[in-house]
Image (tube, coloured by chain):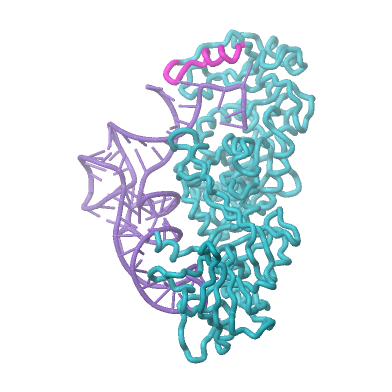
Chain colours: A cyan, B purple
RNA sequence: UGGGGUGUCGUCCAAUGGUAGGACAUCAGACUUUGACUCUGAGUAUCCAGGUUCGAAUCCUGGCACCCCAGCCA
């Protein structure tokens, strides 16, 4: 990662540093609500906020915006902490919670009541909607708006004491019922919710609204640059109003556009539906656009960070081609992933002139991009598997893999020539019989003759069986949100393909959960959480580019 | 409809009055013991209309399109 990614927010930070606006401080935060798992869009915010702090010698807080006990859960808190850590963001020792500030927020609410800047309102939700007016019609005053500060204070204290049923009353800021900005039409600060909170239990029966709480949380933590997404731009005047009314530290809010990806959905509501409706196998199903799914699938956190850095930060709504993420992942893994041979759809090959029972240990390079990765021994014998796709009985044009009478190279082994095709009663090919050239050991011919194709292979007797899971895009259409009908109508029925009996080279038998490899000529793979010794499971993180497959289209 | 925002290759991002550039994608070619990687080349864009200026993506005027806001969600 470069030292200081350039974008308009960095420009603002530079200007603030130059003018000494914050005394040289830069303090950002990532403020998720624990009501679901984090997704790739959150990863952008984590990258942005944490990298801004890091690049400018500042600090970065992780803070849970846990103001709505009805939707939140400890499970989500735990998963979010895991994800943020995995992303490598340095949030220091302390994890912050809005619920830690409830007492202070309440004290400030009383202060606004006493100053005549907030009042208790007894309108029902329906009435409140009606009184709020519409875009082009001003709202009208709630009956509670004219009550004295003394009476309001009494009512507020009784709200807190639990004297009123859920939803019966609210505390509202007294701002402007005629404002063109509807957020300023006396927004709700507190509502009565009789639900236990995952951290404060039943201490409270009134909870601060996001609009009231969010700016206070930033203020309390000394945040300098409060970075959020575009939809909160309309709320900024409200946060300004609260902070100024209270006369407390006033962070600068800056809005940026969230990043959407093609072929997926990114709203928490829809992600929850996919999980609850069993359209996927949980929040961390590798097809999901969640951070935990990306991790399980084998995407390195550095690649995810680099992806968002490459994309950049602007205020333009965008939908990013998911191929862009795949390209970044390939780029990272090409340099770092050890190469191995794995045959996904095995076709048996017998080398007819191979000395019976002989096994040869061949040296194979671990990573041509990284000499320090060294070599490993791979056993070769007269009974092998190759990829079924690598053979065509009647080769199509430009197919330069194996076919009857044709010679190819087995990677790092020998040249072989197909002499016979064995079929079962139904006509399906069950085995290939080939001869090898003993003088081509290692894959070079002393007489200088060339072969076009190089195939990967495994020795049948030494192969390790494994389950391999191939993933495709979760949706068939680029923008499921915009497509006709319900987004669920556009799920890709072939988003998961299970290969139950792939054959892997011997060394993969010891692969540990989370380890990443390039299966040569196939793709990048990662050992899945479900994997156990003797029952290996691999996820395809991303396939290798395949110009042959593309040419055939 | 009132308020707030955004318009640059197919996509994402630069260019801050001076040759519209990069990345991904696409196409063509070279290289190759991974049809990968790498390398070379190509094509494609300033929302529209006026104006200011020697010169406009950038400044001005007027349009147009798209996004957000009428939760006691965040």
| Residue A20 at least partly seen | no
* x and y percentages locating residue A483 in the rendered image: 44, 37
Q: Is residue A130 magenta?
A: yes
Percent coordinates x, y for residue A286 in the rendering: 61, 50
Residue lying at 71% horizontally and 28% vertically, measured from the top left: A69
Quadrant of the image containing the N terminus of chain A? bottom right
**Residue shown at 58% from the left, 74% from the top:** A349
Depth check, front residue: A175 or A363: A363
Labels in figure, total: 0
The residue lying at 65 percent from left, 77 percent from top is: A374
Q: Is residue A116 magenta?
A: no
Measured from the top left, where is residue A459 in percent x and y?
65, 74
Q: Nearer the viewer, residue A249 or A463?
A: A463
Q: Quadrant of residue A462?
A: bottom right
Q: Residue at 52% of width from left, 64% of height from top?
A: A428
Look at the image and give the residue range highlighted in magenta: A123-137
Quarter in which the C terminus of chain A is drawn? bottom left
Quarter occupied by residue A516: bottom right
């Amino acid at each position: 990662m470069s030292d200081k990614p350039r974008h308009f927010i960095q420009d603002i930070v530079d200007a603030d540093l130059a003018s000494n606006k914050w005394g040289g401080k830069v303090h950002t935060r990532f403020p998720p609500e624990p009501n679901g798992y984090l997704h790739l869009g959150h990863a952008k915010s984590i990258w942005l906020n944490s990298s801004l702090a890091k690049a400018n010698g500042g600090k970065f807080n992780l803070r849970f915006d846990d103001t709505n006990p009805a939707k939140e859960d400890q499970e989500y808190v735990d998963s979010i902490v895991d994800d943020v850590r995995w992303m490598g963001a340095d949030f220091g020792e302390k994890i912050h919670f809005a619920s830690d500030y409830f007492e202070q927020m309440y004290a400030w609410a009383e202060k606004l009541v006493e100053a005549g800047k907030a009042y208790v309102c007894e309108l029902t939700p329906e009435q409140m909607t009606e009184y709020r007016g519409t875009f082009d019609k001003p709202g009208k005053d709630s009956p509670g708006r004219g009550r004295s500060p003394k009476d309001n204070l009494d009512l507020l204290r009784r709200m807190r004491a639990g004297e009123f049923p859920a939803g019966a009353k609210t505390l509202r800021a007294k701002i402007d019922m005629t404002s063109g900005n509807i957020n300023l039409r006396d927004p709700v600060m507190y509502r009565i919710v009789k639900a236990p909170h995952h951290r404060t239990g039943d201490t409270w029966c009134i909870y601060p609204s996001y609009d009231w709480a969010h700016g206070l949380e930033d203020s309390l933590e000394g945040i300098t640059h409060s970075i959020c997404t575009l939809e909160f731009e309309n709320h900024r005047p409200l946060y300004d109003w609260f902070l100024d009314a209270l006369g407390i530290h006033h962070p600068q809010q800056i809005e940026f556009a969230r990043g959407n990806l093609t072929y997926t959905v990114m709203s928490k509501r829809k992600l929850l539906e996919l999980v609850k409706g069993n359209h996927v196998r949980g929040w961390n199903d590798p097809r999901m656009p969640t951070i935990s799914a990306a991790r399980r699938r084998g995407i390195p956190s550095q690649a995810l960070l680099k992806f968002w850095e490459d994309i950049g930060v602007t205020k333009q709504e965008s939908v990013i081609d998911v191929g862009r993420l795949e390209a970044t992942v390939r780029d990272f893994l090409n340099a770092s992933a050890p190469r191995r041979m794995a045959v996904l759809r095995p076709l048996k090959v017998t080398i007819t002139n191979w000395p019976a029972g002989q096994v040869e240990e061949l040296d194979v390079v671990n990573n041509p991009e990284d000499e320090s990765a060294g070599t490993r021994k791979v056993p070769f014998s007269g009974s092998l598997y190759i990829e079924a796709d690598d053979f065509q009985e009647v080769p199509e044009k430009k197919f330069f893999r194996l076919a009857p009478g044709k010679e190819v190279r087995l990677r790092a082994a020998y040249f072989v020539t197909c002499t016979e095709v064995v079929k079962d009663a139904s006509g399906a090919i069950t085995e290939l019989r080939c001869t090898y050239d003993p003088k081509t050991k290692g894959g070079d011919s002393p007489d200088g003759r060339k072969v076009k194709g190089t195939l990967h292979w495994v020795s049948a007797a030494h192969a390790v069986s494994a389950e391999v899971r191939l993933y495709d895009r979760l949706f068939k259409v680029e923008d499921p949100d915009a497509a006709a009908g319900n987004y669920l109508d556009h799920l890709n029925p072939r988003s998961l393909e299970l290969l139950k009996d792939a054959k892997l080279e011997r060394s993969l038998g010891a692969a540990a959960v989370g380890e990443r490899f390039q299966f040569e000529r196939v793709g990048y793979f990662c050992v899945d959480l479900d994997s156990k010794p003797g029952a290996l499971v691999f996820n395809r993180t991303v396939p290798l580019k395949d110009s042959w497959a593309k040419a055939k289209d």
